[in-house]
Image (tube, grey):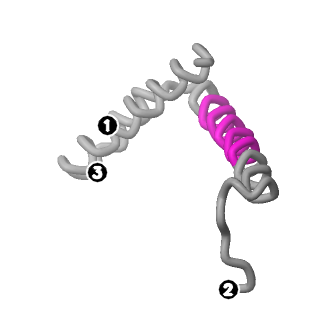
């Protein structure tokens, strides 16, 4: 299931990362980054939401991994 809000957020973060890469290639054009981000806290909130969403996904993934190990579906080497 795709979370449309998370998908849009991911797109905005990718746009920002691309902008940072382009700006870095041209020098220290912090004004362009500041203009892109604007004066509000939308980007800060978006990054925080992305981090929380990613952390939740990692927890779900780990739970599935642990379940597969407990069920013997995934071999593991212990005590390494």
The quadrant holding residue 34 is: top left
Pick whichever, 27 or 60, lies toward us. Answer: 60
Q: Which residue is mark 2?
A: 80
- Label 2 sits on a secondary structure element that is loop
The quadrant holding residue 69 is: bottom right
Residue 28: give its label.
3
What distance separates the C-alpha of mark 1 from that of mark 3?
A: 15 Å
Depicted 50 relative to depicted 2: above or below: below
Q: From the viewer's perspective, is the residue at label 1 or at label 3 nearer?
A: 1
Residue 21, image x and y in percent? 29, 45
Residue 70, image x and y in percent? 81, 58
Q: Quadrant of the N terminus?
A: top right
- Residue at the extreme bottom: 80
What distance separates the C-alpha of mark 2 from that of mark 3?
A: 46 Å
Q: Residues within 10 Å of mark 1 (few under 14, many from 20)?
A: few
Residue 11, image x and y in percent? 44, 25
What distance separates the C-alpha of mark 2 from that of mark 1?
A: 40 Å
Q: Earlier in the sequence, mark 1 or mark 3?
A: 1
Q: Which residue is mark 1?
A: 18
Depicted 65 relative to depicted 6: above or below: below
Q: Which residues are magenta?
A: 44-61
Q: Earlier in the sequence, mark 2 or mark 1?
A: 1
Q: Earlier in the sequence, mark 2 or mark 3?
A: 3
């Amino acid at each position: 299931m795709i979370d449309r809000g998370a998908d849009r957020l991911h797109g905005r973060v990718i746009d920002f990362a691309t902008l940072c890469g382009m700006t870095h290639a041209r020098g220290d054009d912090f004004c362009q980054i500041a203009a892109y981000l604007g004066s509000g806290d939308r980007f800060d909130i978006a990054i925080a939401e992305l981090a929380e969403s990613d952390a939740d996904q990692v927890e779900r993934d780990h739970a599935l991994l642990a379940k597969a190990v407990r069920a013997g579906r995934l071999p593991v080497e212990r005590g390494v």
